[in-house]
Amino acid sequence: KVKSNNLDVEVTESELETEEKCMEEKSTSELDSNILDVSSDYPREKHISIQRHLADLLKLADLKEEEKKPCPLCPEEQYKACYSHKLYRHLQNFHWKVSVEFEGYRMCICYLPCRSVKPNLVGDQTFSKMGAHYHCIICSATITRRTDMIGHINRHVNKGETESRFITVSAPRPSREVLKESATDVQVLPNYSTPQKTDSYFNPKMKLNRQLIFCALAVLAEERKPIECLDAFGATGIMGLQWAKHLGSSVKVTINDCNENSVTLIRENCHLNKMKVKLNTKEDDNEAMGDGEENTDTIEVTKMDANVIMHLRSFDFIHLDPFGTCVNYLDSAFRNVRNLGIVSLTSTDISSLYAKAQHVALRHYGCNIVRTEYFKELAARIIIAAVTRAAARCNKGIEVLLAVALEHFVLVVVRVLRGPSPADDSAKKIRYLIHCQWCEERIFQKEGNMVEENPYQQLPCDCHGSMPGRTAVVLGPLWSGALFNTGFLRRMFSEAVQYGLDEAQPLLKTLVCEAECTTLKHFSIHSPYDENKQEECGIYVKTPDNSAESYLVHGKRKSDEMIRNAAKRQKSDNSAEHPAFYYNIHRHSIKGMNMPKLNKFLKYLFEAGYRVSRTHFDPMGVRTNAPLAQFKTILTKYSAPTYALGQAEGPVHLPEDGQAGEQVPAAADGKAEDAEFLEDDQSGNAAATFTNDYLTHCAAD
């Protein structure tokens, strides 16, 4: 009987085991069937704050007209139970309208104790504050702010991480787009133009900036070969790829980025352009070589912080293009840069540099500024002053080769001069600026440490004597030296012509004219690379051996005596430096007068004996060494009166101090200009006659 019982028990256990196995197989089959249909139900297991429609959120509350219900997303201590109409408004306005949308779902704000908040200790009592937060639909993280949640979702999308942990079927990876610039291909993510910390940020508007930096590097490559150059913030690697592809064995390119995804993208872009890649990271050094059929040059890709790599290694050419200001990287850049090397900086924090956020400029650059008519040149001088101080701390001086300030960026290119003497000479060029707020006249303060009784005497204007109160402000400290090196700019223009950089050539011609403070008409026409395009270039390009800023011959440095002679020639040319700042012709126009054309006005200033040129900082700006009073006098002299409604019935009265000959151009200008002013006179009379007839007709009606 016991055996039979044991047998019966054994049979029962075996039956149970078989039944359990059948249940497991059935559950796995049901799970597989659910996995296939999961795309239609997205997501399956989600937080209650993630809903598709407002009606789904209302179902959680189980609204009933006669009963009070609590909010499903708020604790009872914060929001007590209430009737349906009040709870409906609460869910709609307080949770649904401030939600974050992603692929048809809404991540509503949640006040439940899902997120641990540190308690506040006040005396002997402890107060705990319930923190509002969002639940990420992708990684189920809790984010406090709505803007941070949007950025969090965008970073998931940029990295291709759209696979939610609530979904068992992976979402397709976003396809990459291939862009081409200057014969260089780069692949980027679909949202490459969104500057929200994307791993493949690429700005097509910075093409001109990349061409200018390439020209500067090409000039340095002609001086000595090979040179080691660094792109400290690679992103897609477009700039370093252009250097290696066009300059070849003349440069040893290193592209750095601290983001691992960006480093991976740079490696793929190197293989896309048939470049060999040498990967160098902190942990290990390894090489990954691509198919180098067309180009056998090697690009080194590093994954480090920009400050770290510039402290560890020395370079001949360094380019800094961070997101915002460059001041955090200046000390590292000048620590190990080689003598007579070049450092280029691209600053995109234009809100502070262009005096829109003055407190930020004071915090980053230690500079006091206001909004002026020459705010773009003021921004360039602010950056150069910060660069000079950083170089001086490393016992190095600088020579400014190029300073460009456009709508989206400010570019500064400087040459490094090692030694305490060049550092002292550069530091002496940092001064304060006195700016008159009435007439916008400006002048740099005199050298010296002595305090003057009346600083207003340094200004050429007499606004302080004729106006009440304080009329001027002190700006700075700023760079008071030259912003351009004419010989270097001419050689940059030669490189732009050689490599066919069409967008950079017009700007470089303007910069050469601005550096020499003259107009295009006074240039002799020559280009060493293209004899057929001599008339288009409009600039005579000097050879590097004749320029004062050429320090190297055939890749070797000159002797100390030759460098000293070049420095002496440079000091002798300081008296002929281009004037500081410029005047906007519209800001100083006379009311009731028609100004002459800008090119004609430049001619009148030149005939008056002043140096004059246009400026790239302002399309209507005039750079001249003429004082503002003389500038206004010449502008008034060659301005024609405007025939307004009040002057239509009677003759036009000229100013007392002006003669009839002063209101028209000089006789030397020719009959064409006289005919132009006569035509303006006839058109003005016709307009006045029409206006008079119209007023008479209205009075009759």
Image (cartoon, helix red, strand yellow):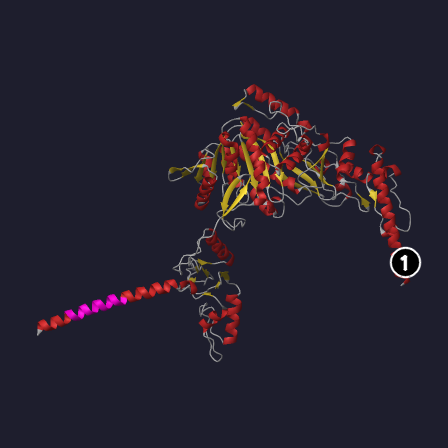
| Residue at the image position 50 percent from the left and 76 percent from the top | 84
Q: Quarter-wise, where is residue 276 in the image?
A: top left
Q: Looking at the picture, which amino acid does disc 1 mark? A: Thr
366 over 396 or under it: above or below: below
In percent of width and height, residue 64 lies at 47, 78
Q: Is residue 509 magenta?
A: no
- Residue under label 1, please give it: 696
Q: Nearer the viewer, residue 187 or 123?
A: 187
- Residue 519 visible to an observer of this rendering: no
Q: Quarter-wise, where is residue 290 in the image?
A: top left
| Residue at the image position 75 percent from the left and 45 percent from the top | 468
Judged left or right of residue 439, residue 548 is left
Instruction: Say what secondary structure mark 1 lies in.
Output: helix
| Residue at the image position 43 percent from the left and 56 percent from the top | 171
Crowd class of label 1 (few under 14; some 14 to 19; many from 20; radius 10 Å): few
- Residue 540 visible to an observer of this rendering: yes
Region in magenta? 10-23
Type of secondary structure dominating the magenta stretch: helix
